[in-house]
Image (cartoon, grey):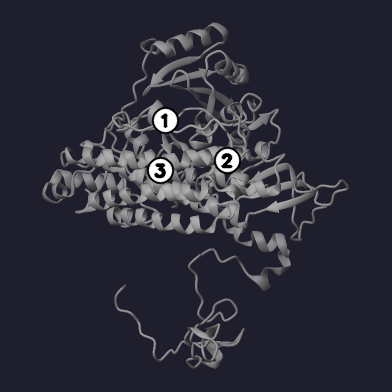
Amino acid sequence: MRKYTPKSDVQKKSYYNDRFHVTPELPKGDVSNDEVFAKDLETLKANFAIENAYIQRGHLVVFIDAKKNKEIIKFAKVELGYDFLMELSALDYISSRGGFEVFYEMLSTSKHKRMRLKCFVELGEAIESVESIFRSADWAEREMYDMFGIKLKNHPYPKRILMPDDWYDHPLRKTYPLQGDEAAQWYEVDKIFGKEARDIIGAEIRDSAAIDRYDTTRFARLGHEVPYGFDIQKEGEPEHTPLAYQEEDGVKLFGARLITKFDEKESKVLDKRK
Amino acid sequence: MQHVNKLKPFFENISFEREDNTMIVNFGPQHPSAHGQLRLILELQGEEVIKAVPDVGYLHRGMEKMAENMIYNEFLPTTDRMDYIAATSNNYGFALAVEKLLGIEAPRRAEVIRTMLVELNRIISHLFWLATHALDVGAMSVFLYCFREREFAMDLMEDYCGARLTHSAVRIGGVPLDLPKGWLESLEKFIAHVVPQVAMYEGLLTENRIWKMRLENVGIISEEMAKSWGCSGITLRGSGVKWDLRKEMPYGLYSELDFDVPVSYACDSYGRYLCYMEEIRQSAKILTQLITMYKDTSSELMAHAPEYISAPKEQIMTQNYSLMQHFVLVTQGMRPPVGEVYVATESPKGELGYYICSDGTPYPYRIKLRAPSFWHTGILQDLLPGHQLADVVTIIGSLNIVFGEIDR
């Protein structure tokens, strides 16, 4: 019987897990241990509802409400001095929690500190764009939409950025297949010429290293050249054809000989790199 | 109208036939000065750009998806293919991020070697930048000179790790090899050679009338704009913000090293050019300090963390437990703690960040690669309008974008 793999997560998995192995967790430090972060969190808490906050490896992580993301980021920029939105993306938790975790990586050049704002967005829910606060969110949010399919509200140009416009599905979801399906080999033929041309053109060659020595329409045979469309299997292997592709007495420039004519018989194969 | 069965170009929001006087030009993706696969859709009024839409994704290989299906050590060579002009910077950033996740530190000698390689890569990258930028603007000989010096630096890389472009010279937890015999002497020779050469390039360009006319007051990025767009590296420092991660949030050995951070308040392409030239000199200065630093380090090259990192080769070959551990680490991969880190390093292009979310399995749950060029390309849509078509080439050049890391 074929091995069952859950369809909610088709990512590669470790083939062996020690059942006694306990993975340690990165310590989540108390925010009050850091003076600057404690102050920032206090100001944030005074203005917004903060779900959870901790320091992990010197990095402040704050969980916020996804509906308030724009206000909080604006507040962080204006009041707290986090003047850079360095990165913005999402994590796929569709199978376990039914949505995505969006994170905003912020940097304060005045405090020399980094803060990560995280919020949870349910599948199918849209998130407010922060492009009007940080222009850098323009492309980052487009990428997030492209890769995860998280819809954006009030984005000026909500279009795919890396994948083609007519692409189906969002590649960074855990459900996205790791290998192409069999229908995909007909994709271009169907789209450009129509299904009826399948027999004439054939499926897309998906093996990038594929070489067919008897295919004289697509592969050259240097030194054993044959006419286009010649059937080698029927008419036999061709004779050796000389590699002559130069002017009879070489190439001349202003009367002086620049390149001598290539003579196959006099050429020498080097046995060592110079 | 779009016909289903016919191949016809289809551009959203763009109509090529227009009634007003503007013209739409496709700049790239096969344009020699688009620095890779950049497609810029420019709307021109005469020779003036009135709208620019950068279109990226022609080199998208899905590295973040690949990362989720590889063990950590497997992914390291893939990072080479991001900023392929300075591959070791990517390796180093990734190794540093994983080390932070694991909570380990590379031995001092390994850190010295890594910093050397990273700074050498910075010189390689800046020379390459100057070469191509000068060529775009029209200075052919600078291109040839820069490539010659870059070749010497690449020879040094080749002597160390065997590769010239995609080095993978760094490992998680250290470096695989010590410096070969005579390498430091060659490095000293290279530094002694490259510093006067930089002065020669400056002699050719800095006061050159044409160079100044093409670069000065072209591509002005104001401080607010740079901050809003998340610019980093020289694009940010060229806008008058003194922010270099090596100085401001030091990692590795940078807190012990003495170097200056060049800043330009002119905010234009010329200012950025001056910063690049100074940075080559500063990197040479760092390298000189590292040579003396190397001499008083002990010989360890990899961190000692048997749970995550294989033992040295001779131990693997002689001790059973080390061999077993090595086998597990190679076939299954290390299992880092559950948690997430974001580690940013100053790559030659700007802030190169790795966000890693680990769920405790050998495969990362999510890796987000924060590549500086991505934002430096995005800024083109705000920066280009108002410039002449000829300036577009200068601006793309001066932003120093590389498509391996934009599309990832």
**Label for residue A123?**
none
Q: CA distance from mark 2 to mark 1?
A: 22 Å
* Residue B227: % across, % down: 56, 28
* Residue under pointer 2: B269
Picture coordinates of residue B357 (x, y %)?
Answer: 42, 32
| Chain letter of disc 1 in the image | B
From this view, report whether residue B46 is shown above or below residue A268. Answer: above
Q: Earlier in the sequence, mark 3 or mark 1?
A: 1
Left or right side of B260 for B206: right
> Whole-Å distance between the Cαs marked 3 and 1?
17 Å
Foreground pick, B204 / B347: B204
Q: Is residue B51 shown left or right of residue B82? A: right
First in residue order: circle 3 vs circle 2: 2
Question: For the point 37% across and 49% down, which residue is it?
Answer: B196
Q: Chain of mark 3?
A: B
Report which residue position mark 1 lands on. B245
Compared to B172, does B357 lie above or below? above
Q: Disc 1 marks which amino acid?
A: Leu
